[in-house]
Amino acid sequence: MAQFFDLWAQYGPLMLAGLATTAWICALATALGLAIGLLLACLESTPFTPLRWAVRAYIEIMRGLPILILLFVLYYGGPSIGLRLSAEAVGVFGLGFYGAAYFAEIFRSGFQSISKGQIEAARMAGLSGTQIIRHIKLPQMLVMITPPMVNQIIILIKESAVLSIITVAELTKNTTQFVNETYAVIEPYLAAALLYWLLVEAVAQLGKYVERRVRF
């Protein structure tokens, strides 16, 4: 036990810095993924068939693509076409674009949960498509989609561990440095597991709070 506290005193700041990096990258990626996902879900109902096909193709490709392959393409393949991004930027965009496909499906299921009668009544009342989405679809579907949305955010947080492979100094990368420098294994990974759990638990509790608010 004394050894654990000695190691934590020396490497604790490194682990906390990794946690902070994981948190802000996942926060930005989630915001990006939610924005793109909502846009994709709205475009899936467009009357322009080629656009609908393009949206569906994007969703299917991203859902079938391992996140690590996407990160490699952006980080190592990007410079060959003039796209030079930092490892952290690749992490944000990679997780965001990847998560957007799943968020789009969650939004789509939420939109489909709204009865057609309400939509027809809104159209008869003179509401535009944008007004229908804003005042009828979004408020009602939030109740339904909050749990799966929170679950998807948690999945993104856990999948962010692969960012260590493209040199992002996030929690897993810093834990590996801890292990390599001290030759300890159990202590660093137990500490990393605890920090990941705390981050995930914070998101889960925030999700429960949002779910209570949208229900009332």
Image: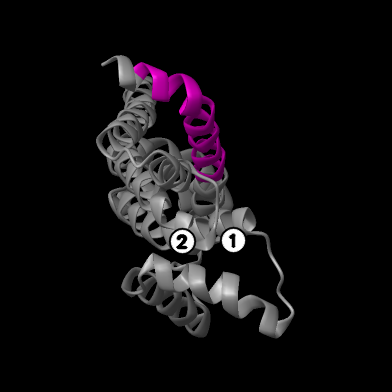
The answer to which of 157 and 118 lies nearer the viewer is 157
Q: Amino acid at mark 2?
A: Ile
Q: Which mark is residue 144?
A: none
Q: CA distance from mark 1 to mark 2?
A: 12 Å
**According to the image, label 2 marks what residue?**
165
Q: Amino acid at mark 1?
A: Val
Q: Residue at x 45, y 75 (%)?
A: 58
Can residue 70 be seen here? The reply is yes
Q: Are marks 1 and 2 in contact (CB under 8 Å)?
A: no
Left or right of 24, for residue 213: left
Indicate the secondary structure of the residue bearing disc 2.
helix
Magenta: predominant secondary structure element? helix
| Residue 182 x/y as whole percent | 40, 38
Residue 104's place in the image compared with 193, above or below, is below
Indicate the secondary structure of the residue bearing disc 1.
helix
Residue 43's place in the image compared with 168, above or below, is below
| Residue 2 x/y as whole percent | 31, 14
Residue 156 in magenta stretch? no
Q: Residue at x 44, y 68 (%)?
A: 44
Residue 24 in magenta stretch? yes
The local crowd at label 1, few if under 14, some if 14 to 19, many if 20 or more residues have their Cα within 10 Å, is many
First in sequence: mark 1 or mark 2? 1
**Image quadrant in which you'd find residue 198:** top left
Q: Residue at x 48, y 53 (%)?
A: 123
The residue segment tinted magenta is 5-27
The local crowd at label 2, few if under 14, some if 14 to 19, many if 20 or more residues have their Cα within 10 Å, is some
**According to the image, label 1 marks what residue?**
90
